[in-house]
């Protein structure tokens, strides 16, 4: 144990000696949280819509106004034709109100309004389509224009996030990205630096075992990672008004084991690399792609096609995203997420064994 603590102390002293590394450990999580938290938006807003009104009656203008006052659409006044506006991207939606729109409705007849959607972005096209139905339904209800009552009236309530705040979805995912990427990068740099500078020979010659070496480095960069976690969580709570609603003990235990996974992956990347540059590439590229593409950060894991979906099961970030979103949004606690710390612990043990085997072979 004394050798492990000595190795930990040495690592922390080396970490603090490199001022640029210390600055990056603080600055990178802050920049990532702010950029991803504000830049990523899954819900379309201010979608440009061009309108051609052949009816030109008070009722048709009121229908247009309903689109104008919604947060989803933004009216575009353009001298271009509808086709030109859609082709050039000036408008993403075109609405064409037919002649006799108002007369048909007042006579109790249906009046079809044509909408042309830019389907370049499939996800936004689906959102826009739903928005059109929503605005139209509100217009019909507000003006009491319903011709006949439908047999089924859906009454929808959104659980856990009734205000549809995107921060409650995005920011817990950003936490996972930050706590995966940056502890791993710092640990990989530290591991590779000793080999690049030739200091690793002195470490092996000192008589320290592979287990003590790994645990010492793990403890040192786990302390750094805990500091990054506290800093990032504090910023997220202050900037994005997040609140814990889950079991805090589950979040603390799960976060601690997840950070161990992140640091261990960084040590693994450093162990298989000969230079700091290659260690950064392995740790940064691999973890960034895994979190963004295979963890459920942007889209559900269920959307990942087979056999890539199998890779998601060995990504620790997949489970931590679920845990963090439960802690800030759902709040099921141990009842719903008891298995997450267990899986993270198993993944950490597997990584430790791989690093131990690699490091043991390198010893004198």
Image (tube, rainbow, N blue to C red):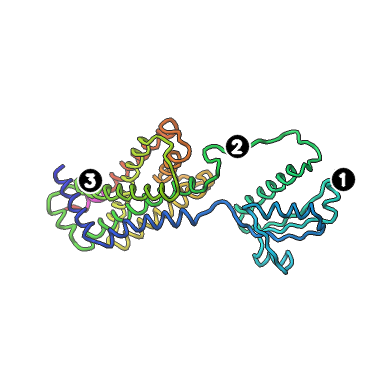
Judging depth in this view, the residue of 101 and 301 nearest the camera is 101
Disc 1/disc 2 C-alpha distance (Å): 34 Å
In the image, the segment drawn in magenta is 357-361
Q: Residue furthest bottom?
A: 79
Q: Which one is in front in this view, the residue at disc 1 or the one at disc 3? A: 1
Which residue in the protein does label 1 denote?
Answer: 107
Direction from residue 211 to residue 78 in the image, left or right: right
Q: In terms of secondary structure, where does tag 1 sit? A: loop
Please identify the quarter of the rendering in which residue 157 is found. top right
Disc 3/disc 2 C-alpha distance (Å): 49 Å
Residue 308 visible to an observer of this rendering:
no
* Magenta stretch: includes residue 348: no
Which residue in the protein does label 3 denote?
Answer: 215
Q: In which quarter of the image is the N terminus?
A: top left
Which residue in the protein does label 2 denote?
Answer: 157
Residue 44 visible to an observer of this rendering:
yes
Q: Is the magenta stretch mostly helix, strand or loop?
A: helix
């Amino acid at each position: 144990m004394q050798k492990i603590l000595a190795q930990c102390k040495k690592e922390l002293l080396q970490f603090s000696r490199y001022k640029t590394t210390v600055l990056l450990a603080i600055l990178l999580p802050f920049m990532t949280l702010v950029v991803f938290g504000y830049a990523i938006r899954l819900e379309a807003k201010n979608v440009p819509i061009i309108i051609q009104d052949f009816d030109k009656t008070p009722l048709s203008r009121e229908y247009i106004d309903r689109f104008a006052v919604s947060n989803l659409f933004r009216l575009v006044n353009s001298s271009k034709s509808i086709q030109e506006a859609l082709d050039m991207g000036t408008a993403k939606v075109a609405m064409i109100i037919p002649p006799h729109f108002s007369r048909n409705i007042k006579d109790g007849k249906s009046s079809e309004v044509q909408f042309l959607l830019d389907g370049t972005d499939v996800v936004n096209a689906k959102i826009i389509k739903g928005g059109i139905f929503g605005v139209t339904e509100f217009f019909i209800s507000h003006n009491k224009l319903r011709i006949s009552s439908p047999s089924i009236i859906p009454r929808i309530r959104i659980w856990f996030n009734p205000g549809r705040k995107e921060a409650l979805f995005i920011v817990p995912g950003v936490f996972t990205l930050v706590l995966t990427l940056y502890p791993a990068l710092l640990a990989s740099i530290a591991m590779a630096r000793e080999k690049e500078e030739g200091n690793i020979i002195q470490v092996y010659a000192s008589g320290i075992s592979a287990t003590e070496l790994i645990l010492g480095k793990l403890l040192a960069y786990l302390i750094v990672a805990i500091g990054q976690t506290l800093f990032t969580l504090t910023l997220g709570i202050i900037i994005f008004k997040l609140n814990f609603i889950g079991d805090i003990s589950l979040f603390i235990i799960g976060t601690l084991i997840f950070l161990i996974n992140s640091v261990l992956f960084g040590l693994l990347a450093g162990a298989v690399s000969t230079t700091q540059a290659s260690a950064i590439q392995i740790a940064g590229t691999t973890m960034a792609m895994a979190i963004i593409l295979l963890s459920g950060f942007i889209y559900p894991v269920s959307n990942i096609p087979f056999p890539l979906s199998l890779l998601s099961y060995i990504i620790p970030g997949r489970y931590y995203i679920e845990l963090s979103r439960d802690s800030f949004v759902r709040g099921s606690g141990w009842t719903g997420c008891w298995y997450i710390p267990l899986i993270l612990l198993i993944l950490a043990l597997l990584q430790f064994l791989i690093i131990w085997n690699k490091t043991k072979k390198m010893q004198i």
